[in-house]
Image: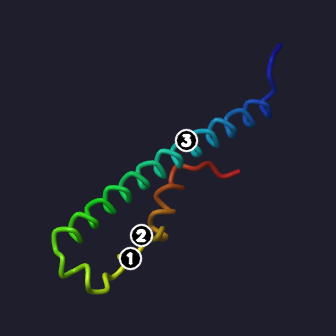
Amino acid sequence: MEWSEAHHRVVFRFKILILFLYLLNEFLIIMFVFDFFQDIERERKKRDNLEAMDEDIEEEDVAEIKAAHFEESMKYARRS
C-alpha cells in the first residue's frame, strides 16, 4: 500500500514534534542539575563564611529566555 504525501507530511511533523519535546526535556534536566549544583555551592559558601549567614543574601537573577534563544531554536523549524 502506497502512503499519500499528506500522510508523509503528518509523520514528518510528528517526528519533529517528538524531537523537539525530547530536546526540551534534555534541556530542562540539564538546567535542573545545574541549579542543583549552584544551590550546593551557595550553601557551601554560606557555611564557610559565617558572617554571610547573618546578612541578607541577595537572590540571583533567574535566567530568561530571550528573543535570540527563541530565534536560534526556531531556525530549523519548518513552516506549515
Q: Is residue 42 above or below residue 77?
A: below
Amino acid at pointer 3: Tyr
Amino acid at pointer 1: Asp
Query: Dot 3 surroundings within 10 Å: few (below 14), some, or many (20 or more)?
Result: few
Closer to the chain start, of discs 1 and 3, is: 3
Q: Residue furthest bottom?
A: 55
Q: Which residue is mark 2?
A: 63
Give the residue at x 79% y 31%. 7
**Local secondary structure at mark 2:** loop
Which quadrant of the figure has residue 52?
A: bottom left
Q: Which mark is residue 73?
A: none
Marks 3 and 2, how far apart at CA? 21 Å
Residues at circles 2 and 1 in contact by the CB criterion of under 8 Å: yes
Give the residue at x 64% y 35%. 15
Q: Which residue is mark 3?
A: 22
Q: Is residue 59 above or below residue 30?
A: below
What quarter of the picture does the N terminus occupy? top right
Residues at circles 3 and 2 in contact by the CB criterion of under 8 Å: no
Give the residue at x 49% y 70%. 67
Query: Dot 2 surroundings within 10 Å: few (below 14), some, or many (20 or more)?
Result: few
Q: Which residue is mark 1?
A: 61
- Where in the figure is residue 47, as x and y percent of width and height? 21, 68
Q: Is residue 23 above or below residue 58?
A: above
Marks 1 and 3, how far apart at CA? 27 Å
